[in-house]
Image: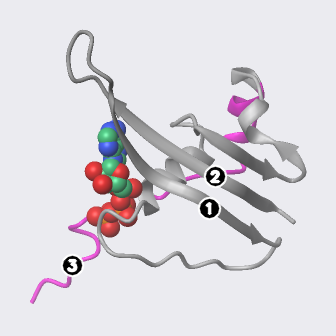
Amino acid sequence: MLLKLDQVTKEFRQSTGWGRPPKVFTALKDVSLSIREGESFGLVGESGSGKTTLTRCILRLEEITSGSIYFDGADLTRMSASEVRALRSQIQIVFQDPYASTTHA
Ligand SMILES: Nc1ncnc2c1ncn2[C@@H]1O[C@H](COP(=O)(O)OP(=O)(O)OP(=O)(O)O)[C@@H](O)[C@H]1O
Ligand SMILES: [Mg+2]
């Protein structure tokens, strides 16, 4: 398996002031999926369902709260910063460009 996510959970914590418990927002809960080499994988969901957050977690732009992410058998979530940098040539994001995706009449 090229990419394997095992029960990935991502919580965002927001402080609500001194002495108060932080507000916790669960953006991803127990997400598991596997993608084989050469396979195309489409992730579909309504706005705010967590597609971008999931992608940012795979790229280690966000730290996950629990679970594991394996790329080519190696646990991405336990890699050092320099190991993650070395993987940047193999895992990349194509950012959304609203102008590029709009048909101008
Ligand atoms: N840094 C953050 N702190 C707090 N909440 C966040 C943060 N980033 C994302 N969220 C929340 O996580 C949820 C998932 O957002 P995300 O951007 O991943 O959705 P999406 O599926 O990519 O939506 P869209 O289709 O609009 O791009 C949203 O409710 C969003 O408000
Ligand atoms: Mg998005």
| Residue 17, x across and y down, in percent | 20, 16
Q: Nearer the viewer, residue 8 or 40?
A: 8
* Image-quadrant location for residue 47: bottom left
Q: Is residue 12 left or right of residue 68?
A: left
In the rendered image, the vertical position of residue 71 relative to residue 1, given as above or below: above
**Which quadrant would the C terminus be assigned to in this image?**
bottom left
Mark 3, residues whose alpha carbon is within 10 Å: few (<14), some, or many (≥20)? few
Magenta segment's dominant SS is loop
Mark 2, residues whose alpha carbon is within 10 Å: few (<14), some, or many (≥20)? many
In the rendered image, the vertical position of residue 45 relative to residue 14, given as above or below: below
| Residue 81, x across and y down, in percent | 69, 22
- Is residue 36 covered in magenta? no
Please give the name of the residue rendered at 42% of the width and 60% of the height, measured from the top-left corner: 50
**In the image, what residue type sits under mark 1?**
Val
Q: Residue furthest left?
A: 105
- The residue indicated by pointer 1 is 31
**Which quadrant would the N terminus be assigned to in this image?**
bottom right
Mark 1 to mark 3: distance in Å? Answer: 31 Å
Residue 102: mark: 3
Mark 1 to mark 2: distance in Å? Answer: 5 Å
**In the image, what residue type sits under mark 3?**
Thr
Say whether marks 2 and 3 touch (CB < 8 Å). Answer: no
- The residue indicated by pointer 2 is 8
| Residue 21, x across and y down, in percent | 32, 23
Name the element at disc 1. Answer: strand
Please give the name of the residue rendered at 67% of the width and 79% of the height, measured from the top-left corner: 40
Mark 1, residues whose alpha carbon is within 10 Å: few (<14), some, or many (≥20)? some
